[in-house]
Image (cartoon, grey):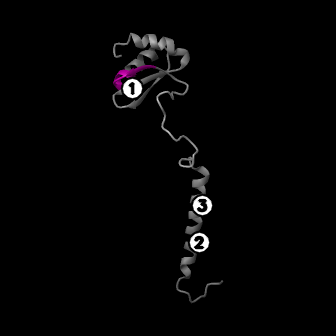
Amino acid sequence: MPIGAGSSLHFLVGPTIAFLALGLLALFMRWAFGTGQGTGQGRSTPATEADDGLLTRVATLSRRESALALRAVLSDAGIRSTVRCPGPHRADVLVFPEDAQRARSLAATFPGG
């Protein structure tokens, strides 16, 4: 149905079509690239303590600074490590499984632990 030349709203047709197309495109992008949350897909619960992935926990300390100091000691011994702070007043030191035994022995002699 053609729009008459005398119509006072003819200037709204183009922007309306453009906004409608953008809205449909946004909905499609949300569907196509969404995380799956709320649809039964993806991770529905937060990570638990046992969910360390490829790493092994060798020490749990009450202060992040102490965990960072232990990490420096492990680094000096050639052991790769990382620190995870899962909650207040708690810091875990994690290493790869092949280094876990050496790291535990160093952590046992660490004065901050």
Dot 2 alpha-carbon crowd within 10 angstroms: few under 14, some 14 to 19, many 20 or more: few
Name the residue tied to disc 2. 17
Dot 1 alpha-carbon crowd within 10 angstroms: few under 14, some 14 to 19, many 20 or more: many
Residue type at mark 2 is Ile
Magenta stretch encompasses residue 66: yes
The Cα–Cα distance between marks 2 and 3, rounded to whole angstroms, is 12 Å
Q: Quadrant of the C terminus?
A: top left
The Cα–Cα distance between marks 1 and 3, rounded to whole angstroms, is 44 Å
Q: Compared to 53, does 42 lie above or below? A: below
Give how far across and how far down residue 16 sits, in percent: 55, 73
Tag 1's secondary structure? strand
Q: Which residues are magenta?
A: 58-67
Give how far across and how far down residue 67 sits, in percent: 38, 22
| Count of numbered circles in the view | 3
Disc nearer the start of the sequence (2/1): 2
Give how far across and how far down residue 49 sits, in percent: 46, 28
Residue type at mark 1 is Ala
Q: Quadrant of the N terminus?
A: bottom right
Tag 2's secondary structure? helix
Name the residue tied to disc 3. 25
